[in-house]
Image (cartoon, rainbow, N blue to C red):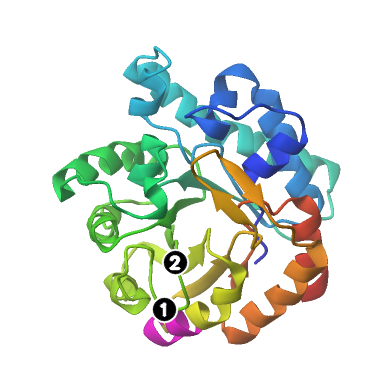
Amino acid sequence: MILDGGLATQLEAQGCDLGNALWSASLLQSNPEAIVTATRAYLDVGAECVATASYQASREGFATWGMSANEADDMMRLSVALARRARDEYRGDNPGLEFVPLVAASIGPYGAMLHDGSEYSGSYGVTAETLRAFHALRLDLFDRSGADVLALETIPSRLEADVLAELLVGCKTPAWISFSCRDGAHVVDGTPLEVVAAKFAGHPTVVAVGVNCTPPQYVPELVGRLREALPDKAIMAYPNSGEIYHAADNSWSGTVTPGDCAEAALAWVAAGADIVGGCCRMGPAHIQAIRNALR
């Protein structure tokens, strides 16, 4: 299966200003049509699963914009509705499709709400109870939102993985969980990938486990570790472009071409990945190149 790339990457390419704590989710209020357009851009190049603009969406985040809990929940539900609309319009324009693209409710880690770079370290300084309360509300909302899959993304720590493993047992919607890794063997908090992945062996609702927001050069080894640890799960790989992110000023350096990413994707599949796509700085051209190489 071919996933989409970075939703924020395409939104910025469309001229949207995402320089705020809510990132792509800010457009749910200010410019929802831009989200539909960006989602459609990935569908038009062959993405078979598209994510919602909800990675940084939460009651806590929207509260900083003066929204009530109910208004925040409406915004999160809207993120699913917009992705479903883009999917429906795409299907209407392509009546010969042999598949129905999936809509994945993007659910970021606790650190994404903090918007302080801690999602790239997992060092939140909070208890499991705090993480459980934060995630339980969003999981319940997205479980009833009409999304095809719950996408727990960029999970950086063993503690957060433990909490999510417990909470996801109670969800009816199939889910995937994807970890952010610092090298070819460890999630960013230093825990071996196999240790956090083991929490999802035989899990009743988690159907796929993978890595994302990780430099692509580490992906073949990481995929191999996941394939060995989780023979019963689909394995995912949707890393960033390989450019370097600077959390201090929200900037990137370096360049990677779509062709580079397509060549790398062949190695991810050879290592055992079943589901591939892109994360930060991978746009529609990267996804199209990956799809062309794999198909």
User: Which stretch appears magenta?
Assistant: 224-230
In the image, 143 versus 20, the foreground residue is: 20
* Residue in front for this viewpoint, 70 or 93: 70
Q: Is residue 227 magenta?
A: yes
State the SS at label 1.
loop
Image location (x, y in percent) of residue 33: 70, 25
3 relative to 70 in the view: left or right: right
Query: Which residue reaches farthest top?
Result: 66
Asked whether 104 falls inside the magenta stretch, the response is no
From the viewer's perspective, is residue 153 above or below residue 275?
Answer: above
Q: Position of residue 259 (x, y in %)?
A: 82, 68
On the image, the x and y values in percent for residue 294 come to 76, 75
Q: Quadrant of the N terminus?
A: bottom right
Please name the residue shown 56% across and 68% down the image: 237
Tell me if I can see residue 283 in this picture. Answer: yes
Residue type beneath disc 1: Ala
At which x and y percent is residue 12? 70, 35
User: The disc labelled 2 sits on which kind of residue?
Assistant: Cys
What label does residue 185 carry, if any?
Answer: 1
The overriding secondary structure of the stretch rendered in magenta is: helix
Q: Give how far apart the Cα atoms at labels 1 and 2 are.
A: 8 Å
Front-lying residue, 85 or 251: 251
- Residue at 64% of width from left, 63% of height from top? 242
Residue 43: assigned label: none
Q: Are marks 1 and 2 in contact (CB under 8 Å)?
A: yes
The answer to whether residue 88 is visible is no
The local secondary structure at tag 2 comes to loop
Q: Is residue 171 left or right of residue 246?
A: left
Residue under the point 32% across and 51% down: 171
Q: Which residue is mark 2?
A: 181
